[in-house]
Image: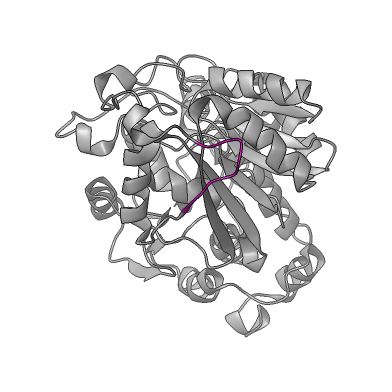
Amino acid sequence: MSFASLGLNAQLVQAINECGYTEPTPIQTQAIPLVLKGGDLLAGAQTGTGKTAGFGLPMLQRLSETKAKPLANGRPPVRALVLTPTRELAAQVEENLRAYAKHSDLTTLAMFGGVSINPQMKALGRKVDIVVATPGRLLDHVSQRSIDLSRVEMLVLDEADRMLDMGFIRDIRRIIAKMPVKRQNLLFSATFSNEIKQLAEDLLHEPEHIEVATRNATADTIAQRFYGVDKNKKRALLSYLIGHNNWQQVLVFTRTKHGANRLAMQLDKDGLPAMAIHGDKSQGARTRALSQFKEGKLRVLVATDIAARGIDISELPHVVNYELPHVAEDYVHRIGRTGRAGSQGEALSLVCFEEKPLLKAIEKLIKQSAQLEILPGYEPLPDSQQPPIEKPGANNRGRGGNGGRGNGGGRGQNPRNANNKAPRSNRPNQPQRHGRHDD
């Protein structure tokens, strides 16, 4: 199977070859012909499966086949919109689309908060065919009338499950109301909750439905290992593993922003160059840290779940869960940063006694048993000597996550702390969350 055999034109095939793509991934094989037909699509795809090309390539081809009439004010219209949950993902998707479009006259623009809105407004004064945006910043532009969505022909919701999980449903509906009823809609999600099914029912018209992997399954290209460790020895064990194994590029996950800052400082003192990336960091600081990490100049990047969205590094060798996530599905998203596009990767999790219930939830989700390895010198205390486990619940909310103003142009705070969540089982029948929480 080749990209040309999927119906893509010569310009796109040339751009794909220059990007180093050799053959399409399963999601690309299935999605590209369906999107080219012009119908709506509901696609289940894990991170790292190549879904950006799955919707981006046929989008570019469809847009290149027709010419758009100018708006009433004489400006060229925005013809396609891609919504993403985070800044980093918006930047990554736009970068990919720009590379695919290099041999066409189609133009792209990334639009997210944490940076000045003025350059984006200036860019919108020129020809912009495709906008990749986070919901909060896009609504800022809508309110300032710097963007007109009335001629959008194609809408993509990328990582729709994460956007709903972050409380974006009201923003998404406000954005949809600004677009024409007749358009092509593509919804990509790693999971299919009841909320996603309802959104798909409201948004999509007689959609094709594809799913390229078992839901919540981890990629076969990722070797998973679990270490049982005393809570107070985690940082020492992490430093040992990185130094002893001579790892040069390691992405480490913590649950909170404060924890990410503290761990990065500690690792730096251990002689392991490290930086933290999370929602309280300025966009400039986040961009610099990510750039240095991608270029191999930074050995360790410590991230929260939200900020790590959009970290797409080919052949990233190691991901470490310094703390297990409160929501089991986030484990799949975390380790999906490695083992991407067919390359091999390794995911390690450091598990202390109080995280055992979280580990059981992960085992149940991925339908795999986790065998805890113990390294001499880092052993946890016997279970009989451990303090009682506090059940996660209301006390876990509202501390240390990514929320509030500045996370992408948002106004107001997300009622749920996205980086320090209580398990979904402890949140029955919650009302819809309406906070603005772009990251």
Which residue is at the far left?
429
Query: Which residue corresponds to the image point at 45% horizontal and 41% vertical from the top-left?
Result: 150
Query: Which residue corresponds to the image point at 45% horizontal and 19% vertical from the top-left?
Result: 403
| Residue closer to the observer: 390 or 61 | 390
Looking at the rendering, the stretch of residues picked out in magenta corresponds to 372-379
The answer to which quarter of the image holds residue 48 is bottom right
Task: Specify whether residue 373 is painted magenta.
Answer: yes
Horizontal placement of 185 versus 205: left or right? Answer: right
The answer to which quarter of the image holds residue 384 is top left
Count numbered badges in the picture. 0
Horizontal placement of 118 versus 29: left or right? Answer: right
Query: Which residue corresponds to the image point at 24% horizontal and 54% vertical from the top-left?
Result: 201
In the rendered image, residue 177, in percent from the top left (x then y), is placed at 34, 37
In the rendered image, residue 219, in percent from the top left (x then y), is placed at 51, 64
Please identify the dominant SS of the magenta region. loop
Horizontal placement of 383 versus 339: left or right? Answer: left
Q: What colour scheme governs how the chains and residues are painted in the rendered image of this protein? A: one colour
In the rendered image, residue 421, in percent from the top left (x then y), is placed at 36, 29
The answer to whether residue 317 is above or below residue 397 is below
Task: Specify whether residue 316 is painted magenta.
Answer: no
| Residue closer to the observer: 342 or 82 | 342
The answer to whether residue 375 is above or below residue 64 is above
The answer to whether residue 289 is above or below residue 344 is above
In the rendered image, residue 217, in percent from the top left (x then y), is placed at 42, 62
**Is residue 126 shown to the viewer in this render?**
no
| Residue closer to the observer: 401 or 347 | 347
- Quarter holding the N terminus is bottom right
**Is residue 265 shown to the viewer in this render?**
yes
